[in-house]
Amino acid sequence: MSKKLLLEKAHVEGIRYYDVYRREGGYRSVEKALKTMGPEAIVEEVKKSGLRGRGGAGFPAGMKWSFIAKPEGVPRHLVCNADESEPGTFKDRYLMEFIPHLLIEGLIVSSFALGSNDTYIYIRGEYAWIVDILEQAIEEAKQNGFLGKNILGIGFDCNIHVQRGAGAYICGEETALIESLEGKRGNPRIKPPFPAVQGLWMRPTVVNNVETLAAVVPIINMGGEEYAKIGVGRSTGTKLISACGNINKPGVYEIDMTISVEEFIYSDEYCGGIPNGKKLKACIPGGSSVPILPANLLLKTAKGKTRYMNYESLSDGGFATGTMMGSGGFIVLDEDQCVVRHTLSLARFYRHESCGQCSPCREGTGWMEKILKNIEYGHGKLSDIDLLWDIQRKIEGNTICPLGDAAAWPVAAAIRHFRDEFEWHVLHPEEAQKRNYGLAHYADPIHVPVTA
Amino acid sequence: MSEQLFKVTIDNITIEVPPGTTILNAARKIGGDVAPPAMCYYSKLEGSGGKCRTCLVEVSKGSEKDPRPMPKLVASCRTTVMDGMEVKNITSERVVDARAGVVEFLLLNHPLDCPICDQAGECHLQDLSYEHGKEATRYEFQRRTFQKHDLGPYIQLHMTRCILCYRCVFTADQLTKKREHGVLDRGDHSEIATLIEKSLDNDFIGNIIDVCPVGALTDKTFRFKNRVWFLKPMDAHRDCPTCSGKVTLWNRGDEVYRVTARKDEWGEVEEWICNTCRFEKKKTSDWVIEGPRLINRHSVISQGHYAGSVGTVIPTETFKAVNDGRQPRLLMDIHDISEVNQTGTSLSAIERPAHSTDFNSKKA
């Protein structure tokens, strides 16, 4: 049973409301931080905790906070990125829906640390009902003196505003989010300048994921060093994983990053195995944009070591044989699933969500989708597979924002690991319409060369 | 006060520029092939650039203080130079490869209707494809089309040709008080349009025709009237109450076919002009003619210029400097063999059709 920090109280009756949340020990971190710690001490504590951004990139949060520029007389802002739109990721939704005060509490502490008097939650447009939940929580916090003017009598003012997006995936990219928040078209900005220098309304801004900000609460409560003891290596603390796909128990799980991928999929505590006695074929461990891995490489690294659910272990082997922790959207595919079709649906998603600002992503994503459609529906050519590889290579790294990379990686990884399935689709177009390629050799043990 | 200059090396050529200069502008100071192509960046428009990705370059050394190379290719139009920075443009295989990719992406849905396009001959996408593109596309699908959109009596919009550089949006934002058009929708179906059919009739809106790098926005009063390479560009001015009145007239004989702003060697407008000058004043008598416009010798527009009478600009040659002083390798040096077209003889200095005697060194 791994330690729970965020979702420990999530199932207490009425935890959504202030009274119960406060009774269960809520808002202790605000009292501790505002009354006994200064802003610098809080940033230092977060740095010590080793907390890494939970939105996908895994950038150390304390480091990000320390980058914020502090020019005289210019307000600073904290923006909470709740635009969770990655296919397969739904951890923030769970957190905000069930235990909204945890986020508000984290926001107050973080706002104090960063000196933000106006803090924004930019929430995904489709999460319409959660806006009401959050606004109610903010109102309750305000009535109890944790928000508004002169919080806890220390002269710190803070207001939290909830802003709904209009349903664009790209607005989860921090600069596109800022543009959208300013009321403009949600196009990513060209960096530099970075948001830490010129963000929202050209003021210094920090954008953090919901889970990152919520994790600030246990860090303050238990101290950064204690927090860093949970987990392993540079993967400290706990991580929310939203598991879905062909598993018995889909849902949001909090893990402390010490368990193996195999345990996560098969143990009854977590996903509970694959239904109907099917075998594992492939998995995307961190949300749709991270590379897909076949079963053999998922459970063991290329060197034959057990793969664990943490940042380092998942990315062991780079993109050649590894993947990424990403945002924790764990998608499991069993032996009946078709990787070509799966890649097509991801390519369609990225084509649809590309903002159209820079040319490689705007044109390349649509092209990849059309080629994948041909392969999937039996009109493909063998040269199409190489063409796909070349297109993704020319998109990756050449775009303004990471959406281009996110669109290229799934295609690249699918071709890298499942090339024979693509070839089978091309060579047996009629059969491919009736049945799937199946498990083939994707779960076979990998030969590990013996080194002296 | 002397300002500290930054030393930056682009393709083995070192130049000193003031801090805050972008890599692209530093490269433009050197000129020639070293300057990366730019389809969306426009030095006169604030906030432009970074979108088309044709100007990607490799930074092989970040600066004197931090010599690490940048991991990704960077958009040179939006990256400022650092002291001691080393940049690779045409000498980097990564850049050449990525740029060919970008050109392919830009042409993917472009209709390639150059034979009927008014922009042909002065189209930046045409130049870009010739210089950096591949001979054929690998795209086998239908190209995207859009619903026709009417922008009023002066400006013709061909959305299929658009490469979404956003220049016209910035122009309308920064030149006019009220922007009526913008980018609708997103991704590969995003388009330049007014929200509900509106005509663009601001005093300075005609400038969006000049900033458009392709034939997406063209002059309706010039539409299908003539080919730009049959026309003679002449610098002219008039006393205009709204703008500077400094324009280029495009003549054939005495007839003014169109009026545009004066464009510099990078195809950028020198001074914005108003709609009256552009669309209404189409008589030679409206203008005071200053003289022929200098045109780059590589441009097709210069083909109508007669030797000696109209000057052309000879583009900067950077080959020797880029390749450590090595001259181009020639299979056959035509100057040696035929003694014709010798480098010492400037064709444009000859006042009449060139003749073999012009090159006959023995005679001279």
Image (cartoon, coloured by chain):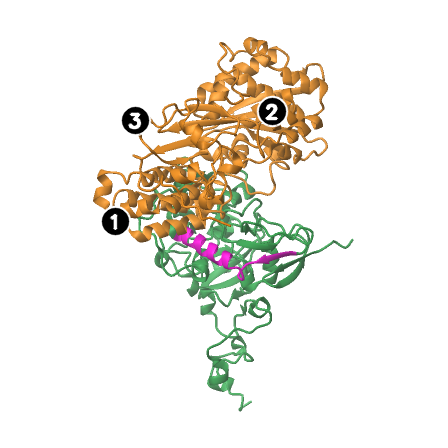
Chain colours: A orange, B green
Q: Nearer the viewer, residue A431 or A88?
A: A431
- Which residue was labeled with disc 2? A216
Marked residue nearer the N-terminal end (1 or 3):
3
Part of the protein shown in magenta: B85-107
Percent coordinates x, y for residue B318 in the rendering: 57, 67
Q: Which residue is mark 3?
A: A276
**Which residue is under mark 1?**
A427
- Say which element carries label 1: helix
Task: Point out residue B57 in the picture as x, y percentages from the top left corner.
Answer: 54, 54
Q: Do tags 3 and 2 sit on the same chain? A: yes
Q: Nearer the viewer, mark 3 or mark 2?
A: 3
Q: Chain of mark 1?
A: A
Q: Amino acid at mark 2?
A: Val
Position of residue B99 relative to residue A266, above or below, is below
Q: Quadrant of residue B133?
A: bottom left
**How many numbered callouts?**
3
Is B96 covered by the magenta stretch? yes
Instruction: Say if mark 2 contacts mark 1, CB within 8 Å.
Output: no
